[in-house]
Structure formats: C-alpha cells, structure tokens
C-alpha cells in the first residue's frame, strides 16, 4: 500500500531535501490556474494534524457543523476548510488526526464581504491511509511552520469568519479553544462591603425601577456548559452556565450569559466567593434541573434569578481570594451529602448524593444523541466507572456524563481517588447505580487539595481505609474498556414499557448507516436464531493482523435476487477464505509502531453462489489457486475504486472487512457450529445478510497496567482533535479480562428476507466488570440459558462448561421465537460493534394484548 501511495502522490508530494514542498507546489498550481478549483493529476498525500468543528452559518439541521482541517506535507502546515460533502468522513471517525489523507481536488475560497480574507478548501478526498514513513519522524507538530503567503489567511479561529469560536470535536458542552480563559488564582482585591444587598431583598428590586446594590455570595453549585447555538443565529458566543449562589439569607440561581462564559467559566469554581455588580434580574426559568440542597437550613428563591451579561449593562465580576474572605460576612459553606456504597441501596430513587471511591474500572467514552427536537444535532459524552469505598464488596456503578471538565473526565483511570458530587440514584428492578446530573462536579487524584469537602467525615474515613490496602492486590482487580452497558435488560420484554423499540432486521441497514463515531444505540430485533458459532479468544497466533478492525458487512445477492449461500461446511470454509482474500485492507502494510488504518469508504459486495462454487470445482481450481485468482480480481477492483471513489459514498454501504480465521476450525469441528434445520433452505430467500467479522479487541475489557496508562487513556477517550505523535506511536499488550471465547449468533427475521450476525460474549467470572451489580442466577448451562442470562454458571469444581457441551444444547433454539437486544457502537474506521446483551425466549415475551409467549413456529 505504501508503494501505491508513493505512486499516487507523484513528484509534487516529495518534500525531502532536494525537492520543493508539496503544499508549495500545489499553491503555485492553484495560483496559476484559470479557475479557483484545481484537480490534481496525482493525489496529494498529507498528514492530518488537527480537526476543528464549528456551527455552520449556512446549512440546515442536522448537517449544521463544518470542519477545518490542518494538514502538513512534513515541511509546511496549513489550515483548510473541509467541503461539507466530506463531513461524514469526520463524523464516522474515518478521517482522524494522525492519519494520512489523499487529496485530489482543492479550491480557493474568497470572503467577498471582507478585505483580504481567503482560504483553501479541500473538495475531494480519495481515501484515508496509513501515514507514509516520512511522517513518522515528526515529534512536535507545533514546530512545523504554518504556510501563509499572499491572499491565504492565517487564522486561529474558524475560517468562516461568521463564527468566532470552535466547538469540541465530538460534544458541545466542554470549554474548547483559546477563547476560554484558563483558571488562575484570583488576585488580591479590595472591595467595599458597606453597601451590599442580600438575596432575600432582590425581589423588591425586581418589582421596582431601582438598580440593585452589589451582592456578596458564594458559589454552592455550578452546572456544565449549555450551548444553544443555531444556524443563522446572530450571537457571537451562545453559551450559558447556571450557578447556585448563597449568602446568609438564602440560595438563588445565577446565570452567566454568552461572552462571559468563555471569560469566567473556568474561574467560577464551586466554593468561590464573588462580589457582583451591574447584574440584572429576571423571572426564573422553571423548566430546568436543579441541584438538591437539603443540608442547608436556608430558603431557596425560585421566582427570580441573577443574570450576568456581557453588555447592557456589562456585569462586573470579582472573585475574592479565599484568604480575603471574612468570617463576619457569614457566607455559608458548600453543602455535601456524602453516601457510602452500603448506604446507596437504601436511598430513594432520584435522591442526590456525593460519593468518594477508589476507581477499579473505567469504560471507554461513548456518545448518545440528545433527544432535543430543535436546533443542530447534539451528542452527550459519557463513560461507565466502578469505584469501591470499603463499606461493601460491591462497587459504586457510575454513569458519568461530561461535566465540562475535560481535563478530569478524560483522565479518570483505575487506582485514582474519585469524588463525584450531585449524583442521582437510579433503580431499575434489582439494579442500583448512580448517574451524573447537570450540576455534577468531578475530582480525581491531584485535584483534591483545598477542595471544600476534604474535612467531611466520610471522606476522612475513606482515606483511612485506603491506607490499609495493598496496591498490588487492588491493581489486580482493575480493568478498563470493552463493551459495557448497564443496567441489564429486564427479565421480561414488553414493547410498551421497554425503552427499546423493535426494529425489523430488514431495516437494520438504515440504523447502521446513520451511526456516528462512538455512538451507542440499543435495538430490539425479533426473529429466530438460525445459526450459532463459537470462536476462541484471543485469536490464534497465526491470525494475519495483530489488531482486530472488523466491521459489519452486507452479503451481496445474485442476479435472481436470492441470497447466495453455501449449504455445506466445506463451502462455508471456502467462502470464508474467499472473504479473507478479498478484504479491502488486505494490501495495507502495517508499520510495527502504527495502528493499521483502513482506507476510505470502499464498499465490496461479494456474490457467493452455488454455481460459482461448482464451476470452480469443475475447472479443477484448488483452494489456494482460487484465492490467488480472487485476490487478483480484488486488486483490479481496488485500483479502479481508488481513482473513482468519492467521499459522499461513505456510509452508503457498510464496509466489508470480515476476517474470521475460526471459521475453518468450525468447519472441521462441528461441535462449535450449529445451524437450524430450516437455515440451509431459508438462506436462499435472504436478500440482506448483515455479517459481523471477528470480535474487535476494543470490545473486550483488559487488565490495567500503570506503565500503559497514557496509551490506554488515549484509546479509551474519544479520538482527539490534535495529533500527538508520541501517543499514537505507542503500543501495549492487550490482556483480556476473563474471556476465553465468544459466540456469533445469526438472527433471521420473521419474514425470512434478512438476517444479521451479532456477537455474544458471556460473563465467565466476577473479574469481568459486567458481572458487577447483576444478580447471579443459577441455570442449567444450556446455550439458550447462557444467552438469556448473559453468563455461564461456574460448576461445583470451579470450572466453566466447555464450548462443545454448550453447543450440544443448541438444538433448544430450534423454532424458538426470540427478541434479541443488540448494542450498536461505531468504534471508528468502519468498525461496527454489534453485541447481543440479552436474548428473550418465547416465554419471556409479553405482547401488547397482555398475552405471554408465542405460538409462531417453523413448520
């Protein structure tokens, strides 16, 4: 593949000594062109070093965001705008920092409403590739000089000057960019407290024409940032932050508006004392969440709220250093309500509490879509965390959403002390967990010093408990990453009460195409289990690739419209070898210090028919010869696609990259492969078969090691907006937690026109983080029971049943009408995770009419 990149890049791409800069050569061509657009005869290979997102001023919902792309040829760097037609490359995680990009068309864009403002736009991309060797020597991206000549504008903000700020790359509620003033200790100040007013007196000012006197208050709670920008909106900084402030007379909400948010958000910390002047008052907005303040014997005022505005009038905010706060001011202390793990079970649903614990598990950051019906598309970022406090063997199970504290949220790791405030108790069935609220604040090791909670009795008791622990013992209980979703699905499926809506298997294509990077989505599919296959884990050493980058694939159909499928195990193994040989990334060379990068949005439809198999056998082709012939055909197809591919095709089909070396093993060992009696004949009617490849390494939890902390956090967090070469180049050994194998289930839709393969990874032991908080129900260790409960039961001798024994009971699935709960997550680079988290049997399905079970059977 490197040879292909070198040939495609051409002489203009060589920026080594003795050659001119590739970017410089392109600019010279663009300058001399008669039009503002330039189509390159040879695609230009550049490294992506930064991705910046901002709200577009022109485009309707939901395509409301534009992207600026900073690229380098190794000699110069330049910020370019990414054409809106290419934005899906970013949204799906295919175009990312630290990857190479083959650019085939650029254009010059002039802002006709301003003088001397122009920029380069990337209009067409051939593919995303592994970085050529010459980029691997880059150590400091910031040391690469920025190209700026003549009419090309240098800019720290969005190239579209209608916006003055960038948003975080994946969510909207974090401070991001140089416009957000960082925290700094407040300077010494002298204030006049002789003429101030109390919060209790503000209603009188609100109903009169008098301007209110200054306030002297303390911040008790602070919300995360709320971004309310919309296309066409004429507000420079559409941000909002709520704070709950208090004085000796009571508690009231304070709202920080617009331009003041970037200026003050990082400096308005919980516990700060403020002197406020030139604020305004307005009716309080009632339709919002509020923190629970139960430990203060102060009145809370809900009718009026304080507004800090950047103008008309411009509010004056003064943060008073802690040493200058006088006792006679009688400002209340920040209230806390710390709860131990043993106390949480007896707390009421939705009750607020604060917790402190030692982190034992950290999940990857995922995203879910906001349910807001208006405005641009929004995502919430969240992760699952386990923490223990010694009061019980069970951990806190924490669902932590982004709290506008990215420097803390992104650095939560095992063996750190974690404090979470204003958490809400969630109870569903037998499951109890805590979820963060709008006002939740996070603190980890390194942030606790001088925080108001350090003298809380339960915090001190926790610290004393940690002094009795052995680091080596606790470290052995830690893990990170993998598929994790909590709480478990209820024992009975009722569509009218479950959050999951039933999706037809035939409609799965639309769900997969609309997934965005690290988006989690849960679906319910109904049908019949038509096949089960067992795979060992980790993969065998002879596996071609060290990293699993598998994805969902769609099996093609023959000209008659019938799905082409094998009817024997030999044919199945032959097909799998054919799939392996025609994988779109089979020609990509991997640098030992680099992750393999999948190219572009190529879609490979495969047509497997009996006639094709028979003709191959009739002409005497051996399996090896057939593979070589198919590799040749695939190579010719790839050469054609690289030249003709367009980014708008990204996501139109699901890329097929299945590599399942265990299929050959399954073919020779029938004990690890089961098919229903009707599947061989029904396969001929299936027009869409959504296939998943081998289980991705990212789907399996792994042991945590201190030496790998940085690289693990890098992979657990969302893809960064800036390329950090030293992190991208690091590798580590993946040590799975309690996983020896997994199953692939083929779910056939009720209409028998579509099927989908999903993975099922059973819980084997309590070391698996998925075992926490889940009742351990004993069952007969049949395959159906294991998939229904999500776990294997340990036998009296402490062992788990062998896969062969499980597969012997697979016949129980015959004709069983099931509802399969599937968790989807786009891991990036065309890798779609499809995990079965629950399988409901006929007896466990409640119908809308109140009946239970199903009489539908295959004849």
Image (spheres, helix red, strand yellow):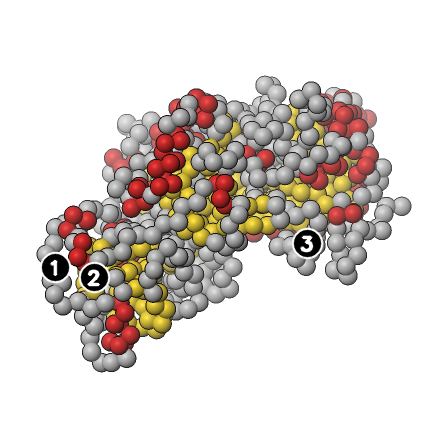
**Residue 851 x, y percent position in the rendering:** 79, 56
Q: Are marks 2 and 1 in contact (CB under 8 Å)?
A: yes
Q: What is the C-alpha distance between the residues marked 2 and 3?
A: 55 Å
Q: Nearer the viewer, mark 1 or mark 3?
A: 1
User: Which of these two is toward me, 5 or 738?
Assistant: 738
- What residue does disc 3 label? 502
Q: Is residue 100 visible?
A: no
- What residue does disc 2 label? 216
Q: Is residue 793 above or below residue 514?
A: above
Q: Is residue 729 above or below residue 337?
A: above
Kindly identify which numbered label has been placed on residue 241: none
Mark nearer the N terminus (1 vs 3): 1
Q: Nearer the viewer, mark 2 or mark 3?
A: 2
Q: Is residue 389 visible?
A: yes
- What residue does disc 1 label? 191
Would you say 205 lies left or right of 300 here?
A: left
Would you say 607 lies left or right of 150 here?
A: right
Mark nearer the N terminus (2 vs 1): 1
Secondary element type, mark 2: strand
**Residue 281 x, y percent position in the rendering:** 28, 72
Secondary element type, mark 3: loop
Q: Is residue 335 above or below residue 720?
A: below
Report the residue at 66% width, 22% height from top: 798
Q: What is the C-alpha distance between the residues marked 1 and 3?
A: 62 Å
Give the image quarter of residue 841: top right
């Amino acid at each position: 593949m490197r040879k292909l990149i070198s040939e495609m890049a051409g002489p203009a791409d060589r920026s080594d000594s003795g050659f001119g800069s590739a970017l410089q050569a392109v600019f010279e061509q663009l300058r001399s062109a008669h039009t503002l657009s330039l189509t390159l005869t040879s695609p230009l290979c550049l490294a992506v070093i930064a991705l910046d997102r901002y709200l577009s001023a022109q485009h309707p919902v939901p395509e409301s965001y534009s992207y600026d792309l900073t690229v380098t040829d190794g000699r110069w760097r330049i910020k370019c705008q990414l054409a809106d037609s290419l934005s899906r490359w970013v949204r799906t995680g295919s175009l990312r920092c630290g990857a190479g990009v083959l650019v085939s068309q650029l254009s010059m864009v002039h802002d006709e409403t301003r003088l001397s403002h122009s920029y380069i736009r990337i209009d067409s991309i051939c593919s995303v590739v592994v970085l050529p060797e010459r980029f691997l020597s880059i150590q400091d991206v910031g040391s690469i000089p920025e190209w700026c000549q003549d009419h090309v504008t240098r800019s720290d903000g969005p190239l579209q000057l209608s916006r003055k700020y960038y948003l975080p790359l994946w969510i909207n509620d974090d401070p991001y960019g140089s416009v957000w003033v960082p925290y700094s200790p407040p300077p010494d100040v002298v204030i006049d407290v002789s003429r101030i007013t109390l919060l209790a007196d503000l209603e009188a000012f609100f109903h009169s024409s008098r301007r209110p006197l200054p306030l002297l208050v303390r911040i008790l709670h602070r919300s995360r940032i709320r971004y309310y920008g919309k296309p066409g909106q004429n507000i420079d900084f559409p941000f909002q932050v709520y704070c709950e402030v208090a004085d000796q007379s009571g508690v009231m909400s304070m709202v920080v508006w617009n331009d003041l948010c970037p200026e003050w958000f990082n400096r308005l910390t919980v516990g700060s004392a403020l002197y406020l002047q030139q604020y305004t008052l307005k009716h309080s907005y009632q339709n919002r969440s509020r923190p629970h303040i139960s430990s203060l014997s102060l009145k809370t005022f809900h009718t009026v709220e304080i507004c800090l505005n950047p103008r008309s009038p411009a509010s004056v905010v003064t943060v008073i250093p802690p040493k200058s706060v006088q006792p006679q001011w009688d400002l209340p202390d920040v209230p806390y309500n710390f709860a131990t793990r043993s106390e949480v079970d007896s707390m009421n649903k939705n009750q607020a509490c604060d917790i402190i614990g030692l982190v034992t598990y950290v999940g990857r950051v995922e995203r879910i879509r906001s349910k807001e019906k208006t405005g641009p598309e929004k995502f919430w970022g969240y992760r699952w965390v386990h923490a223990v406090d010694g009061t019980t063997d069970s951990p806190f199970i924490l669902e932590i959403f982004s709290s506008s504290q990215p420097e803390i949220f992104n650095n939560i790791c095992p063996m750190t002390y974690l404090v979470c405030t204003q958490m809400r108790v969630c109870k569903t069935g037998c499951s109890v967990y805590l979820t963060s609220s709008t006002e939740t604040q996070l603190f980890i090791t390194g942030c606790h010093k001088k925080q108001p909670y350090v003298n809380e009795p339960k915090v001190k008791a926790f610290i004393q408990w940690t002094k009795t622990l052995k680091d080596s013992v606790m470290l052995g209980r830690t893990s990170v990453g993998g598929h994790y979703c909590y709480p478990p699905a209820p024992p009975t499926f009722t569509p009218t009460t479950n959050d999951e809506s039933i999706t037809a298997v035939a409609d799965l294509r639309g769900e997969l195409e609309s997934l965005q990077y690290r988006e989690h989505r849960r679906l319910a599919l109904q049908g019949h289990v038509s096949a089960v296959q067992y795979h060992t884990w980790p993969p065998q050493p002879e596996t071609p690739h060290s990293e699993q980058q598998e994805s969902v694939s769609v099996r093609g159909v023959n000209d008659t419209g019938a799905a082409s499928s094998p009817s024997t195990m030999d044919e199945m193994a032959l097909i799998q070898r054919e799939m392996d040989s025609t994988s779109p990334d089979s020609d990509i060379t991997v640098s030992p210090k680099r992750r393999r990068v999948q190219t572009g949005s190529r879609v490979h439809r495969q047509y497997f028919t009996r006639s094709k198999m028979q003709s191959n056998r009739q002409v005497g082709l051996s399996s090896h010869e057939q593979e070589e012939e198919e590799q040749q055909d695939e190579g010719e197809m790839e050469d054609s696609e690289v030249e003709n591919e367009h980014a708008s095709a990204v996501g139109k089909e699901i890329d097929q990259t299945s590599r399942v070396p265990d299929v050959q093993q399954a073919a020779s060992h029938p004990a690890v492969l089961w098919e229903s009696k009707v599947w061989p004949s029904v396969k001929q009617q299936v027009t869409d078969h959504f296939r998943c490849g081998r289980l991705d390494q990212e789907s399996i939890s792994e042991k945590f090691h201190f030496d790998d902390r940085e690289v693990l956090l890098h992979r657990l967090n969302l893809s960064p907006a800036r390329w950090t070469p030293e992190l991208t180049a690091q590798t580590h050994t993946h040590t799975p937690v309690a996983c020896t194998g997994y199953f692939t289930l083929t779910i056939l839709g009720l209409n028998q026109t579509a099927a989908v393969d999903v993975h099922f990874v059973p819980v084997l032991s309590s070391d698996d983080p998925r075992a926490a908080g889940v009742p351990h129900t004993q069952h007969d260790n049949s395959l159906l029971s294991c998939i229904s409960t999500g776990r294997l039961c340990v036998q009296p001798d402490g062992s788990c049943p062998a896969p062969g024994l499980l597969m012997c009971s697979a016949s129980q699935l015959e004709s069983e009408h099931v509802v399969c709960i599937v968790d989807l997550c786009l891991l990036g680079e065309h890798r779609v995770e499809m995990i079965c988290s629950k399988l409901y049997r006929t007896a466990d399905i409640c119908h809308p009419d109140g009946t239970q079970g199903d009489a539908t059977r295959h004849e």
